[in-house]
Amino acid sequence: MSRIAERFAALKAEDRAAFIPYIVAGDPDAKTAARILAGLPAAGADLIELGLPFSDPMADGPAIQRGAARALAEGMTTAKVLELVAGFRAADRVTPIILMGYFNPILSLGLDAFAKAAGEAGVDGLIMVDVPPEEGGLLAAALEHHDIALIRLATPTTDEARLATVASGTQGFVYFVAVTGVTGAKEANADAIAADVARVRAASALPVAVGFGIRTAARAAEVARIADAAVVGSALVETIAQEIAIKRDPAPKVLDTAAAMAQAVRSARVN
Amino acid sequence: MPLVLALEAAYAAAKADPAFQAELAGYLATYVGRPSPLYFAARLSEHVGAKIYLKREELNHTGAHKINNCMGQILLARRMGKVRIIAETGAGQHGVATATACALFGLPCVVYMGAVDVERQAPNVQRMNLLGAEVRPVTSGSATLKDAMNEALRDWVSNVADTYYLIGSTAGPHPYPLMVRDFQRVIGVEAREQILEIEQRLPDALVACVGGGSNALGLFHPFLADEGVRLFGVEAAGEGMDGRHAAALAGGRPGVLHGALSYLLQDADGQILEAHSISAGLDYPGIGPEHAWLAEIGRARYLTATDEEALEAFQLCARLEGIIPALESAHALARLPEVAAEVGRDGIVILNLSGRGDKDLATVAERLGKRG
C-alpha cells in the first residue's frame, strides 16, 4: 500500500480528516524551509503539500506568488526541491509528500528523469495545476512507472461528465478546489463545499481533499467535517512573509499556525 | 478546462454559422474600415531592391491589426452571453482594440497591463481610459505582457460565469491560437486577392514581425499551400541575441506556458525568462505554437531584428514613405534588405505593416536622444 493510502486508511480508522499544510519549497530559503518541513509532522500535518516554485504561477494568488519568488530568488531549483524532500524522508518514513506545481520545470527536466528522481527522493504524489487530463498521458505514464500518484483537481465548475474523467485519472485522492479562483483569494463557502464534495464522492471512491480558500482554523474545522482532508496554504505562506518582514525566523510561527489548524481539524468531528 | 472546452464548442458553432460570419464581415467593412489597402511602396522598393508592397493594417480603426481579432471575439462573447470582458495587453494596441469593441457594445472591460508597459505606452493607457475601460497595472514578475496574461487568467478563473477572456495573440490555451489566427486570416485573404489583381501573380515572399505571432499568421495562413511564396517571420532580438531579447524561436526551446506547448525563453530549470524588446508588443517569452510548427517543418523562416535595427527601419519608413510604423512592424521592415536579396529586384514582397507608430514616439524620442 502506498504511503498516501496507508495514511488515509489510518485516519479513517480514527474517524477524522487529514490536515494538509502547504508551503513553497525553498521559501524563504532552502535551510529554513527544511526546518519548517521537518517540524510539520509534529505540528500535526498528516500529509504535506510542497509547492514547486515557478516563475509564472497563474493559479496562485499574491501570497504564494511571492513565496515562489522568494524561493527562486534564493536559487531554488527542481533538483533542490527533491533534495529537500530526500532530507525530510531520511527522518520521516510515513508522512506522504505531495508536490504541487506547474508543468514547465518538470518538462524541462524530462518527465521520466523527474519521476525517477522524485520517486527516489521519497515523493508520493504530484499535482500539476496546468496539465489537464487530456494532455496528461505522458506524465501519468512516467509517474506510474515510479509509483508516484498523479492527483487531479476538480473545481466547482467541473460538471458530472468531467468529474468522471477526473475521477478515472486520479490516484491517491481527489483534490477539490473549493473556490472558483486562485489560491488564497476568496473564503470558501462550507455549504457549497458540502454539495460539491458529495458530487465528487459520487464519482470517485478515493478520499477527497479540499483546498484553496481555507484561511482560518474555524474554516479548516468545517471542511474537516465534510471532506477527508483540509489543505491550508496561503495562510502559512503569508505567515512566512510577515515574520521575515520583521526579521524573525519564520519557522516557530508557521509551525504554531499549522498546529492550531491541525488541532481544529483533529477536534472537528468530536461531538 | 470546462471553460476552454465551452469556448471551443461555441467558436466551432459560430465559425460554421453564416449569420455570425456575415455580422463580422459587416463590422469589419463599416467599423474597422476593411479591406485595408495593399500599397506599392515605390521609394522603399528602390531602397531595398525588390518590389515591396505594404499591407496597411495600420490604417484600421484603432491603428493596428488587433481590432480584426477583437471584433470576432467580441461577437463570440455576445453569442455566449458573457457580460464582462477582460484582456491582457503589451503595447496597448490589443487593449485599445478590446476597449473599443467593448465600448461599441456597451460591455464593461478590464485590461491587464504590465506596470512597465503602462509607463512606456502612456498614450494607449489614456485611450483605454477614454473608451471606458479599466486598466489594471500588473506589478508581479517582470511586469510586462506575460505577467499581464497571468493576471488575466487569474481573473478569468475567478469570474468564470460571466466573463469572457479576449486574448490578443496566437498564444494561450486551445482554441485561442487557432481562433485568433482565423480572425486575422482576413489580412492574408485580402492581400492574396489584391496582389493577384495588381500583379496577376502571387508574391515571392511575405514578411511580418512575430511576438505571439497573430499578424504574421494572419498574413501567412492563406498562402501556406502556395509553395512558391516564402514566409519570413521576424522576432525581436532586443539588445542582441547575446543579451536580453524576445526571440523565442531563435533563442528558446520547447516548453509549456499559458496552456500552450511552443518555443519559450526559459532558464536551465524551466523557469520562464523575461523577454526584452524596445517594442512592448513583441515582449512575450513565447511564440504561437503554429509558428513553432511552421519553423520545424521548414515552411516559414524566422529571422531576428535588434532594437537598434528596428529604430533605424522605423525612421527609414517614415522618411521614405511618409508612414510612421509601429516599432513592432519596424522589426519586419528591418529585415527587408535580406528578403529583397533573396527574391531579387523583380521579386514581389508583401510586408504586413501591422500597426502605426504614434504610440511609440516617446520611446523613440528617448532612445534617439540618448544616442545623441
Image: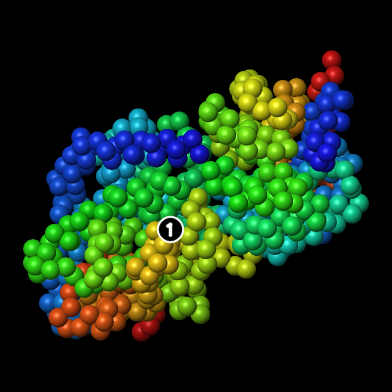
Q: Is residue B286 left or right of residue B100?
A: right
Helix, strand or loop at disc 1? helix
Which residue is most to the top?
A271
Q: Is residue A82 left or right of residue A87?
A: left
Residue tagged 1: B289
Q: Is residue B184 visible?
A: yes
> Is the image coloured rainbow, by chain, by secondary structure, or in one colour?
rainbow
Quadrant, the N terminus of chain A: top right
Who is closer to the viewer here, A61 or B43? B43
The residue depicted at 27 percent of the width and 74 percent of the height is B333
Q: Is residue B134 left or right of residue B146?
A: left
Quadrant, the C terminus of chain A: top right
Image x and y of residue A221, in percent: 76, 26
Image x and y of residue B142, in percent: 53, 61
Image x and y of residue B228, in percent: 23, 71
Who is closer to the viewer here, A228 or B154? A228
Quadrant in the rendering for residue B273: bottom right
Instruction: Give the mark count.
Output: 1
Q: Label 1: chain?
A: B
**As displayed, is residue A50 above or below residue A20?**
below
**As displayed, is residue A44 above or below residue B337?**
above
The residue depicted at 16 percent of the width and 52 percent of the height is B34
Quadrant in the rendering for residue B163: top left
Who is closer to the viewer here, B257 or B147? B257
The residue depicted at 70 percent of the width and 65 percent of the height is A75
For disc 1, the neighbor class at 10 Å (few under 14, some 14 to 19, many from 20) is: many
